[in-house]
Image (cartoon, rainbow, N blue to C red):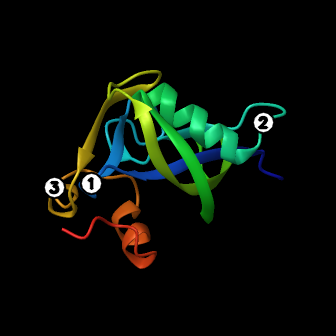
Amino acid sequence: MERRRVPAAGAVVRDAEGRLLLVRRGRPPQAGRWTLPGGRVEAGESPAAAAAREVAEETGIVVEVGGEWLVLERPGPDGVVFEIHDFVATAVGGELRAGDDAADAAWFTRAEMGTLELTTDLFGILERAGLLPER
């Protein structure tokens, strides 16, 4: 049986102090865990545009999207497979606040991230890509 593929997009965003922007998922899958801001790509939208929109909706932060650094697949409910396109982005405005389906949003250092319940292998994926905060 062919699984339905759903395109999604997210972004790695750092502040001026080098901290990483994360959101606490408010809905399944992995509700309650911290992850990169992101969500589904809407019809007619590019993954990069979706990443910028999702960051703004979930965190209040306006970003300029740079290069794509990762595409990965994650299983979802009801046999869905999310094809996630992650980008590196730069914060250019806005005010931090949790919105949309994010239960919370905050900036974190590497040490602080080590104490959080993160989504599956997020820390390892970011570490292997060299995208974790330096401290």
Mark 1 or 3: in front is 1
Image quarter for residue 58? Answer: top left
What separation in Å lies between label 2 and label 3 (alpha carbons)? Answer: 34 Å
Q: Amino acid at mark 3?
A: Glu
Q: Amino acid at mark 1?
A: Arg
For label 3, the residue is 112
In percent of the image, x 68 and y 40: which residue is there? 49
For label 1, the residue is 19
Tell which circle, 1 or 2, labels the residue nearer the N-terminal end: 1
Image quarter for residue 99? Answer: top left
Taking depth in this image into account, of 118 and 76 the one nearest to the observer is 118
Lateral position of residue 91 relative to residue 54, left or right: left
Secondary structure at numbered mark 2: loop
Lateral position of residue 15 relative to residue 79, left or right: left
- Marks 1 and 3 close (CB-CB < 8 Å): no
Tell which circle, 1 or 3, labels the residue nearer the N-terminal end: 1
Q: Residues within 10 Å of mark 1 (few under 14, many from 20)?
A: many
Taking depth in this image into account, of 94 and 54 the one nearest to the observer is 94
For label 2, the residue is 45
One can see residue 8 in this view: yes
Considering the image in quadrants, where does the C terminus appear?
bottom left
Q: Residues within 10 Å of mark 3 (few under 14, many from 20)?
A: few
Taking depth in this image into account, of 42 and 53 the one nearest to the observer is 53
Q: Amino acid at mark 2?
A: Glu
In percent of the image, x 22 and y 63: which residue is there? 110
Name the spot of residue 88 as percent of width and height, x first: 52, 58
In percent of the image, x 83 and y 52: which residue is there? 2
Q: Residues within 10 Å of mark 2 (few under 14, many from 20)?
A: few
